[in-house]
Image (cartoon, rainbow, N blue to C red):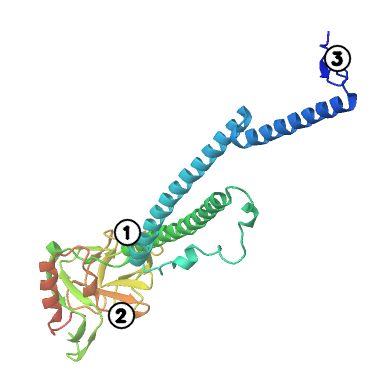
Amino acid sequence: MAKVKYYYDPDTLSYRKIEKKKRRTFTYALGFVVASALFGFIIVVIASYYIQSPKERELARELENMELQYELLNRRMDDAISALENVEERDNSIYRLYFEANPIPKEQRRAGFGGVNRYKKYQGYDNTRLIAESNQKLDILEKAIVVQSKSLDEIAKLAEDKEKFLAAIPAIQPVRNKDLTRMASGYGYRTDPFTKVRKFHYGMDFTAKRGTPIYATGDGVVTRADNRSSGYGKHIRIDHGYGYVSLYAHLYKYNVRKNQKVKRGDIIGFVGSTGRSQAPHLHYEVSKDGNRINPINFYYGNLSAAEFNELLQQASLENQSLD
């Protein structure tokens, strides 16, 4: 039951009942409700800034973890780029230099990342810098790895060619030192044994007993094994590739046939004195691109320094050749 309130009226010297006005009551109530709603809204807004819901806290943790992972990824990519740059440096200064290939400039290794902003699609986000930087580094890595892979493929091919080249060059003496009587005549002007006229001798003469083994001085293919070349008698020619051809003349007999593949050190024939020859010996020549060159420059494969120096002294003597 609502309480009834009175007030004292001095004019009538009596107490009168206080009558409540409904409009005022409604106004007070409405004001209270509006004030309460406004206060509640302010509290909610403030709480939304300073107090996170469980879902918001979970999303915030995920965002922090993502930022941390991007930072770690960027550091790992920095390490990978640094390691790749070290490989690139060795590739240019060691591998490509050794195989006489032109170094790959850095501009070519990093080409394709200038001009149009390829990372524009990542702009407008809270972590734009991290995302764009990570994608840029990943692009650099992918590009550099492709270029380096192609370079290593080229180096592998050059190494294979270099190995074949080194095996093909006529690099050993065609008659072993222990089988030699002597090195009779070298490359250069010598006296002809038949006419006694001084003329140019295009090979080296190795004196040895009839039947002494003759060895292929490099890998190649036998292009001739016959006696149809004037003065050489029974002779063999081997095409080593790369412009090199070796010739072995005045043989007693063959141990190979035309078109046969031979390896350095294979016995291809035996010393004789066929053709225009004064005594059993091997006349040996080396040609490069059709020009006959001094064979003495190609004996590094099986002679010691002392043996080579001795051979060099003997070959320099202007004596009489044996053919």
Residue shown at 35% from the left, 72% from the top: 244
Depth check: give the residue in front, 183 or 63. 63
Q: Residue at x 19, y 75 (%)?
A: 205
Question: Which one is earlier in the sequence, the residue at label 2 or at label 1?
Answer: 1
Image x and y of residue 53, in percent: 62, 29
Q: Quadrant of the N terminus?
A: top right
Q: Which residue is mark 1?
A: 263
> Residue 68: x, y in percent?
49, 41
| Mark 2 burial class by Cα count in 10 Å: few <14, some 14-19, many 20+ | some
Label ID, residue 14: 3
Give the residue drawn at x 82%, y 15%.
5
Residue 292: which numbered mark, if any? 2
Under circle 2, the secondary element is: strand
In the rendered image, the vertical position of residue 202 relative to residue 225, given as above or below: below
Q: Is residue 10 above or below residue 91?
A: above
Name the outermost residue toward the top. 1
- Name the element at disc 1: loop
Q: Quadrant of residue 46?
A: top right
- Farthest residue to the bottom: give it: 197
The answer to which quarter of the image holds residue 155 is bottom left
Any part of residue 164 in sight: no
Q: Is residue 10 above or below residue 124?
A: above
Of mark 1 and mark 3, the one earlier in the sequence is 3
- For the residues marked 1 and 3, what is the alpha-carbon distance in whole angstroms? 144 Å
Please identify the quarter of the rendering in which residue 196 is found. bottom left
| Depicted 82 relative to depicted 231: above or below | above
Q: Amino acid at mark 2?
A: Arg
Which mark's residue is nearer the viewer, 1 or 3? 3
- Amino acid bearing label 1: Lys
Left or right side of 311 for 35? right
